[in-house]
Amino acid sequence: MHPVDHATVVAEDVSKVFFSGGEPVWALEDFSLTVEPGSFTCIVGPSGCGKSTFLRILGGLEERTVGEVTMRGADHPVPAAFVFQEHGVFPWMTVQDNVSFGLRMTGTGARERREIAQDWLRRVRLEAFADSYPHQLSGGMRQRVAIARAFATGSPVLLMDEPLGALDAQTRMLMQEELIALWEAERKTVLMVTHDIDEAIILSDRVIVMSGRPGTVREDLAVPFERPRSFDIERSPEFGELRSRIWNLLREDVRAAEETS
Amino acid sequence: MSTIDSAPSVEDERARRTLVAARAQRERDRRLRYRDLTLSIAAPIVLVLLWEVSARMLIIDPRFFPAPTRILAAGIDMVRSGELWAHTAPTLVRLLLGGGLGAIAGIVMGLLMGSSRALNATLGPLFSALYPLPKIAIFPILLMIFGPTELPKIIAVFITTFFVMQIASVSGVWAIDRKLLEAGTAYGATGFDRFRFVVLPGAMPFVFSGLKTATGTAVVVVTAVEFTGASETGLGYLIWNSWQLFIPEKLYVGLLVIGIIGAVLTALLSRSEKLLLPWRRG
Ligand SMILES: Nc1ncnc2c1ncn2[C@@H]1O[C@H](COP(=O)(O)OP(=O)(O)OP(=O)(O)O)[C@@H](O)[C@H]1O
Ligand SMILES: [Mg+2]
């Protein structure tokens, strides 16, 4: 049912300049990144360094100032499905209509749409809420709807901007486990922004550490842990090493970001 | 043995007590709801009774405030003779035709302006300049153009609702959470799909609150238009004419019917809002 035409995302020297009150703000400067098909990549970086901006450029929600972006092999009508920082599900659609929205826009028939949506609702354990409206769900459930919508669309690339950012710590851990399982079953190309270093290591094959504004790639780290993964890796010495390495890279910039804001 | 047995029964007992407490709570809620309902019905009844008694005992001047029973009697007479309907029907036609068409045109225009930057740049300033103009002041111009027919009255109501709905719909589109518009874009909603699945439902809450405002304004304008010499029908004319002939009972009947029309329209709108927008809280 799911085609395996995974895509590679290539960004070359992407820069983005905003103007806020006449002053140019460099959100991104010469940001280059190549993402392997079927890989899970996390981007971490200090607040305001341009992570969301980069993801939004990839998702076609923001225009880049200069640079090149290509999605190789992405012939799906929705080349990249987006999960927003705070869910962004439509309050006027039922849970099921939300999940099947991307399919509807790509012209999938009603019956197939319903089957796929129900399958995804089962996978995120929301089948009992198919006909509920988002305001009847908890924050964590809404976030699951957003994630199901992204997966159900069938896009080869998923772009997730802090998809678990608004959740409490316990729900977040559960959702991380679910996300690992969903991804390991689907092997889509995922690019995810997170503030949480542990989350980045647990989920991804590769962690991109960004510098403070203007955002550039400071370090590109491979995550060596085997798949399928569990939270046990948190206790291994390699995990601690990787985490302190990332933290050391971030520390100065995070402090600088705190001071400027 | 006894410990094994007693454990569940203690739990049962606790669950039973919790349920009893929950039921008592629900009972209390229900009693409060009944009380609120009773109060809201009783207050106007008491007021009317007070009015009746004061009018009969000449505490208030019955020439200005005729007793409710006399107003009712006058109303029944007017229904019998067909006079009341002869005035209600034209008002309803003006209100529903002018207001309905005005609302549709206003909503369409507002949604288009909310979605098209160029259209909004073209028409936005113009409409903003015209909006605060009291529409009733345009009425003489309409009379000049169309003569003392039905058309100027319907147009006056049309213009009123049009402006209210245009502004409400534009605001409705602008108030849509940016993230939801982006979610539409991100999942490939363009053109009419975008309008149908994102812009239209997103603007609906504002459209409905606009409709309620527009109803109130339209009732005012239709009454005012009928006050003018240009009208010899309608509830506004009935009220005005009853004042000139000094028949206070008929004046109050006209007032009552206009009030009922406004209330019924507003109630219908609230009901359809609940039906059409089930996704709204509360
Ligand atoms: N529409 C905009 N207009 C002007 N400036 C903007 C705009 N969007 C973002 N910026 C600026 O660009 C910079 C990068 O913003 P961005 O949202 O990409 O940061 P971020 O890394 O996602 O931060 P966070 O981790 O806090 O979400 C910020 O300094 C922000 O002020
Ligand atoms: Mg961000």
Image (cartoon, coloured by chain):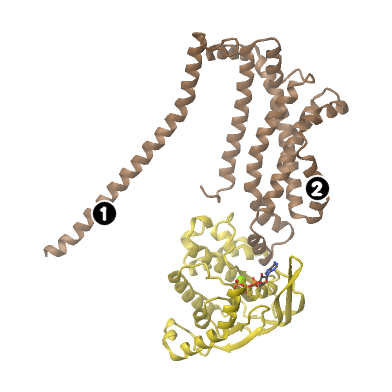
Give me the residue at 56% from left, 76% from top: A194
Q: Is residue B59 above or below residue A226?
A: above
Judging by colour alone, the chain drawn in brown in this rendered image is B
Q: Which mark is residue B15?
A: 1
Q: Which mark is residue B149?
A: none
Q: Colour of chain A?
A: yellow
Question: Is the residue at mark 1 in contact range of ligand 1, meaning its CB lies under 8 Å from it?
Answer: no
Q: Quadrant of ligand 2?
A: bottom right
Q: Is residue A95 above or below residue A5?
A: above
Q: Earlier in the sequence, mark 1 or mark 2?
A: 1
Give me the residue at 76% from left, 46% from top: B109
Q: CA separation, marks 1 and 2?
A: 65 Å
Pick the residue in front: A10 or B178.
Answer: B178
Residue B218 visible in rendering: yes
Give the percent coordinates (x, y) of residue B173. 69, 52
Amino acid type, callout 1:
Ala
* Label 2 secondary element: helix
Q: Which residue is mark 2?
A: B125
- Letter of the chain that mark 2 sits on in the rendering: B
Amino acid type, callout 2:
Pro
Give the percent coordinates (x, y) of residue B63. 60, 9
- Letter of the chain that mark 1 sits on in the rendering: B
Give me the residue at 48% from left, 17% from top: B50
Q: Left of A190 or right of it: where is A137? A: left
Mark 1 and mark 2 residues within 8 Å of each other at the beta carbon: no
Q: Residues within 10 Å of mark 2 (few under 14, many from 20)?
A: few
Question: For the view shown, which residue lies furthest in the left direction?
Answer: B1
